[in-house]
Image (cartoon, rainbow, N blue to C red):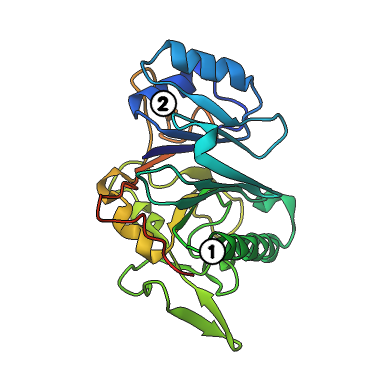
């Protein structure tokens, strides 16, 4: 499964999205802040490719637009205040919970980090309940978290509880214990995209006027339960900076079309004849 996520900030033209989807053979295209005609996007995709795309979700005003080469019958949907939760359940594939988020911006609050941690806790609680309902935790979260990987909402035990080292993140069945409560881990591979050794130094550029400024931030991330990490093609996970048709960076090397850059990754969700589409217990 090839996945592209992009916060398009209502700036990206349909033809550019078609180019990004086609260049990467995307099976799922997840968009935040997309306010254009979803039907036109799907029609243009289908007329420019031999693959057949279907709108999964794209009502104006909702946080996430989802388009896929898999059909609506392959998913269950759960609408949330901060995004969308999909349960992928196609025969021959591992049942997988795919959550896509667009959490509030730091600019919306004077207490941004505390408020963002609140929204992260709220979403994580909903997700734990959904894992219990589906009786597995084959779970990943994608999207614009509006936080860097080290911030409270990403790392606090009662929020997303995500850490950067897979060897440290225990496999399912083990938890972080805090205040006599148990919290299962997420693994966050996004730490590996930070810095300027491989492509763009981050997915979002913002030069603060304060004494300290990161300039480059990694707000667009994926986190996953540790058992899911073996399904991630590590070499595929990257920040996209161009398509065949255009450069996504401006002449300063910063995001030039949207204020965010898209991220791309591949998952192997296939199961074999001897694999009964195993479910990882929560």
- Residue 196 appears in the picture as rendered: yes
Query: What is the x, y in percent for residue 178?
Result: 56, 84
- Residue 261 appears in the picture as rendered: no
Up-down relation of residue 123 to residue 167 (above or below)? above
Name the residue tied to disc 1.
154
Up-down relation of residue 265 to residue 16 (above or below)? below
Judge by depth and name the residue closer to the eye, 102 or 252: 102
Q: Quadrant of the N terminus?
A: top left
Judged from the image, the secondary structure of the residue bearing numbered disc 2 is: helix
Describe residue 97's horizontal placement relative to residue 195 as left or right: right
> Which class describes the residues within 10 Å of circle 2: few (<14), some (14-19), or many (20+)?
many
At 73% from the left and 50% from the top, the residue drawn is: 108
Label annotation for residue 20: 2
Q: Earlier in the sequence, mark 2 or mark 1?
A: 2
Query: What is the x, y in percent for residue 149?
Result: 48, 60
At 38% from the left and 33% from the top, the residue drawn is: 241
Judge by depth and name the residue closer to the eye, 203 or 251: 203
Up-down relation of residue 115 to residue 73 (above or below)? below
């Amino acid at each position: 499964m090839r996945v592209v996520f992009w916060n398009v900030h209502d700036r990206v033209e349909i033809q550019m999205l078609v180019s990004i989807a086609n260049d990467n053979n995307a099976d799922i295209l997840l968009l935040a802040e997309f306010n254009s005609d979803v039907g036109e996007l799907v029609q243009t995709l289908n007329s420019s490719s031999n693959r057949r795309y279907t709108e999964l979700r794209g009502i104006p005003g909702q946080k996430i637009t989802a388009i896929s080469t898999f059909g609506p019958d392959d998913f269950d949907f759960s609408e949330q205040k901060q995004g969308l939760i999909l349960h992928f359940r196609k025969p021959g594939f591992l049942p997988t919970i795919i959550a896509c988020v667009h959490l509030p911006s730091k600019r919306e609050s004077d207490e941004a980090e505390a408020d963002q941690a609140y929204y992260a806790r709220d979403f994580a609680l909903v997700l734990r309940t959904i894992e219990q309902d589906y009786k597995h935790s084959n779970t990943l979260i994608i999207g614009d978290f509006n936080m860097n990987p080290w911030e409270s909402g990403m790392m606090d035990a009662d929020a997303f509880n995500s850490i950067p080292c897979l060897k440290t993140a225990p496999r399912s069945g083990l938890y972080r214990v805090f205040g006599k409560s148990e919290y299962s881990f997420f693994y966050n591979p996004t730490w590996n995209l930070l810095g300027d050794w491989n492509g763009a130094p981050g997915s979002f550029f913002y030069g603060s006027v304060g004494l300290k400024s990161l300039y480059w931030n990694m707000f667009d991330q994926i986190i996953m339960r540790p058992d899911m990490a073996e399904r991630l093609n590590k070499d595929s996970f990257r920040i996209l900076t161009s398509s065949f048709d255009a450069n996504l960076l401006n002449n300063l090397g910063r995001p030039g079309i949207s204020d965010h850059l898209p991220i791309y990754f591949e998952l192997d969700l296939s199961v074999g004849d001897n694999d009964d589409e195993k479910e990882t217990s929560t």
